[in-house]
Image (spheres, helix red, strand yellow):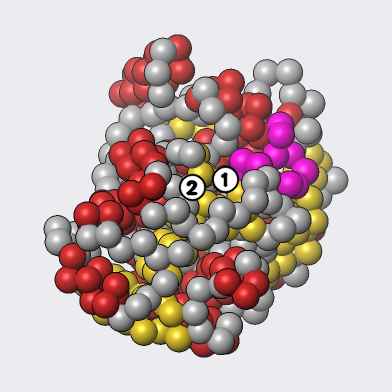
Amino acid sequence: MKGLPFLSTLLSVLVAISLVACGRPATSGTGGSQGAAPQGQAGQPAGSQATQGEPIRIGAVVPLTGRYASLGNQVRPGYEIAVEDINAQGGVLVGGQRRPLELRLYDDESDPAKTVQRLETLNSSDKVVAYLGSAGSDLHAAGAAIGDKNRLPYLGIAFGLLQIHQRGLKYLFSPFPKSPDMARAGLELAASVGADKPTRYAIFVEKTDWGLEQAQYYRQEVERQGGQVVFQEEYAPGAKDLSDLILRAKSAGADALLGMPNPPDGMTIVRQMKELDWNPKYIMLIRAPDGVTWGENLGKDGDYVAHIAGWHHDFKAPGVAELNAKYQARFGRPADVLTGPAYACVQILADAIQRAGKLDGESIRNALATTDLQNTVIGPVKFNPDGTGVVITPVTQWQNGKSELVWPPEQASKPFLYPAVPFSQR
């Protein structure tokens, strides 16, 4: 953040640290102390409708520092703005009383061990009725099991790893696309161009749980669409030279590339593709292109790359325009890709609490399982028995230095650009 938003945040942090030093929790919704102290409480804003009764306390653990900080700092404002909006509308009706939500939020520092510690603190000390999850598959893998252990619902976004949902966890719910959804949407987009669609695919496989899983579903969808995987190879994350994979994919005659690299690896792939003059017609990279740094660092070379971040600020759903306006006022840009799904998590949880009419974890969990909500900022939401969400999977594409929404057709704000123009002609 720059300018006044930064000063506001700094002031909030200083106030919160002062309060914690005095033995009281931070009361700011935008700042707080580091470590095990809560990062703040988002509560009832000035001018909101009157609520009755004690606040309903919900807890979040988010990576505000460490390797996933860029994700966590998109998730946090989604949670906080949603709580403010729900309270401004009168809170949640439970037992005949309208009660405000109170958000207790901790930084897990992108450390799975601290994710678990903070979730346990939210249960034992803060007495929350439900968890809002972190960001990143390994943090969710560590944290989701704590929901079942403490019999508290755990809602999480910003992870695509389906394996987490295959562990029999009853309290885990994720209104976010998973590996099969991403592969299906990406291949449907490629097939939408008709006879000139790509047919010879290369898959670059990151040697991680999610990378291996995503490659499996990529291959299934390629074959379902009548294509052929002509090259597939694993690589270690953090590799500095991927020229061997690129040259072998080029030699195999691949006209499309599928992958799931982290941001540095994704940028390395694109730069070396340009250097080695490999110009596939279609490039689909999950994760790496999600942040604004993709366009900033690659410029025109980053264009034409399709990706799936889970949401987009041009998404057509109730409340998106209002969320964008609030985010623009605070941060000087429309809502970030993870802010919308985070906001929706609070909408979904508030709806479940109200339908449950009780505040015990099992009642809220059972209400979540029967969710059929039409008016969230990510569109309609239901859950499968394993806690995966039945949600829309939007595909975005970098065009002229911006990430644009191109799929599905009823959501698209820009046409899909295909085939990719060769690097030397951009």
- Tag 1's secondary structure? strand
Going by the numbered disc 1, the residue's amino acid type is Glu
CB within 8 Å, label 2 to label 1: yes
Q: CA distance from mark 2 to mark 1?
A: 6 Å
Q: Nearer the viewer, residue 148 or 246?
A: 246
Q: Which residue in the structure is indicated by mark 2?
A: 398
Q: Which residue in the structure is indicated by mark 1?
A: 404
Q: Is the N terminus in the top left, top right, bottom left or bottom right quadrant? A: top left
Q: Is residue 169 visible?
A: no
Going by the numbered disc 2, the residue's amino acid type is Trp
Based on the displayed image, in which of its 4 quarters is residue 14 positioned?
Answer: top left
Local packing at callout 1 (Cα closer than 10 Å; few below 14, some 14-19, many 20+) is many
Which residue lies at the image location 35% right of the left edge and 26% below the top edge?
Answer: 20
Which residue lies at the image location 72% right of the left edge and 67% below the top edge?
Answer: 382
Task: Pick whichever of labels 2 and 1 is earlier in the sequence.
Answer: 2
Q: Is residue 276 magenta?
A: no
The image position of residue 35, as x and y in percent, is 28, 39
From this view, report whether residue 334 is shown above or below residue 71. Answer: above
- Tag 2's secondary structure? strand
Q: Is residue 182 visible?
A: yes
**The residue stretch that appears in magenta:** 312-322
The image position of residue 252, as x and y in percent, is 30, 81
From this view, report whether residue 360 is shown above or below residue 109. Answer: below
